[in-house]
Amino acid sequence: MTPDIPHLWPLIGVAVIIAGFVLRFNPMLVVIVTAVATAAAAGFGPMAILTAIGNGFIKTRNLPLIILLPLAVIGLLERHGLRQHAQNWISRIKSATAGRLLIVYLAARELTAAMGLTSLGGHPQMVRPLLAPMAEGATETRYGKLPDRIRHKLRAYAAATDNVGLFFGEDIFVAFGAIVLMTTFLHEAGIDVEPLHVAMWGIPTAIAAFIIHAWRLRRLDQALARELDGAAASDVPAVPATQEGC
Amino acid sequence: MILSIQHLYILVGLILAITAVMTLADRQHPKRYTSALFWGLYSLVFLVGDKLPPALVGVGAIAMAVIAGMRGVGAGKHDEPTPAQYEASAKRLGNKLFMPALAIPLVTVIGTVLVSKVKIGDAFLLDPKNTTLVSLGVGCVAALALACWLTRETPVQGMRESRRLTDALGWAVVLPQMLGMLGLVFSDAGVGKAVAYVTTSYINMDIRFVAVAVYVLGMALFTIIMGNGFAAFPVMTGGVGVPVLVGVYHGDPAVMAAIGMFSGYCGTLMTPMAANFNIVPAALLELPDKNAVIRVQIPTAATLLVVNIFLMYFLMFR
């Protein structure tokens, strides 16, 4: 290590954000207080702090687009029964379980992301209106009406499966931004690597991610069977729930 | 270019402005004025944010955080169909309901893959730097038109539904952008350098396996703090990867980069700082526990991190 010691005061920011999240203050407040504290610790004046916050807020305006743009369509379709239809649709497939459905989705999401098709999924346009209701519908067909706790667990698994599939697929697509970022950084450090090699060496981890998460989804099915089986008469198809609380 | 990300900012700004006006007009809204102010301020960020002095935007961001922190952002009353109406509509429209929902990703992919090189005259049709986002915007508008036609609703109803879902999300919609801002402030203030210094100067990396573990776990830990693997990569690779793993032990840099970035992604799965992936979906799926998605992801991510240490150790020095 070279002996030039950087300023350690900005680390106060890390302490503030961890404390804020642990003490369960409102995350928006925690973030803004952390930003002010970090910038102040680095010696910024009041105007420079406000400018840094404003500039950062403008530069990151692209982040909420992916959430906000699909809401009108999804909301309109939900009003006309999209979630109910997704549940009814899956209940016709007798062999479907939440775990199997999510394993198939995981494979599809990871493979398409690896081909660069990262937008074939996502929480607002795929998980909320389709995947989560299908996971709930498949479970309901088997075990009857679900308690809220199980419902919430299935939804969380659906959201997590979308993330795992996306993350460990996209990075083995050679033209993905992360690969460009990595090779550019290494090039500036005097090391030249082929983007294709970086993509290729991601494959073992991508496979491991699939195996680990798919195994956990199988365990989810087993846990559901254990918890719900006695409670339901399996030959009576349950009426899918239509109204969900907020 | 003909369609740029700037157009999307205006579109989102208008949607948020309509949300603010609808909130203000909603007499039954329990937090009518503060909620309307919150969405109004947010719409200004999109409509005129880049033309305002940055310090003023900073004041606006702080005001939004204070409104959210004082529980000033609430949901209005939305008239929802009855369960029977939902079922009847689902039966009547059937698989047609899937079409607009699937049109969004379909149009996005077509735009990204096929239209991205299309030029009219000298100008690209789609913003070449933001092809995916611009295609997504086009997809959403096309899907909305299709949905209105199928369900015989007006775009105004679409705006009402957009407001209903925005209300359900609440301030969580703004959190990813807040955290993105914090990431930039962190890097301006040199937090990355300080963290790298602390993690690398107090650990003995004379043992090759320890050095690999420090790099893998450091990528994850740093991503947990910053909420983004892209922010962790330059710091950890500059601090440990290049000087120690490649410089001292002559490991394969392609393996290091590939598995290193994936280790960062394991961190992304475990942190509330990656709000877009973890906190927003919890709000979107109406989960009472905001960390429910993270809780499900931690076992997968932690197991994969251990696997990554061994994969990197054996593949890098083969």
Image: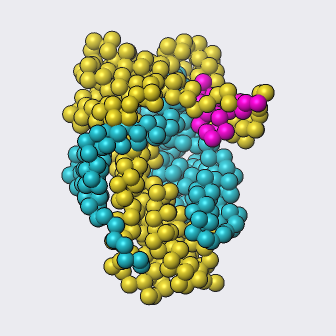
**Depth check: B180 or B147 in front?**
B180
Instruction: Using the image, determine if residue A230 lies above or below residue B42.
Output: below
The image quadrant of residue B170 is: top left
Q: Is residue B296 visible?
A: no
Queried whether the magenta region covers residue B133, the answer comes back as yes
Q: How many marks?
A: 0
Name which quarter of the figure residue B135 lies in: top right
Q: Residue drawn 35% across and 54% down?
A: B189
Query: Is residue B138 shown to the viewer in this render?
Result: yes
Apparent colour of chain A: cyan
Is residue B156 positioned above or below B115 on the image?
A: above
Q: Colour of chain B?
A: yellow
Residue B171 among magenta residues: no
> Residue A78's x, y, as percent?
50, 26
Please report the residue visible at 50 percent of the width from the left and 63 percent of the height from the top. Answer: B233
Q: Position of residue A203 (x, y in %)?
A: 64, 66
Residue at figure coordinates x 37%, y 77% from the top left: A3
Q: Is residue B180 above or below residue A79?
A: below
Q: Residue at x 62, y 77 (%)?
A: B252
Q: Which residues make up the magenta segment?
A: B122-141
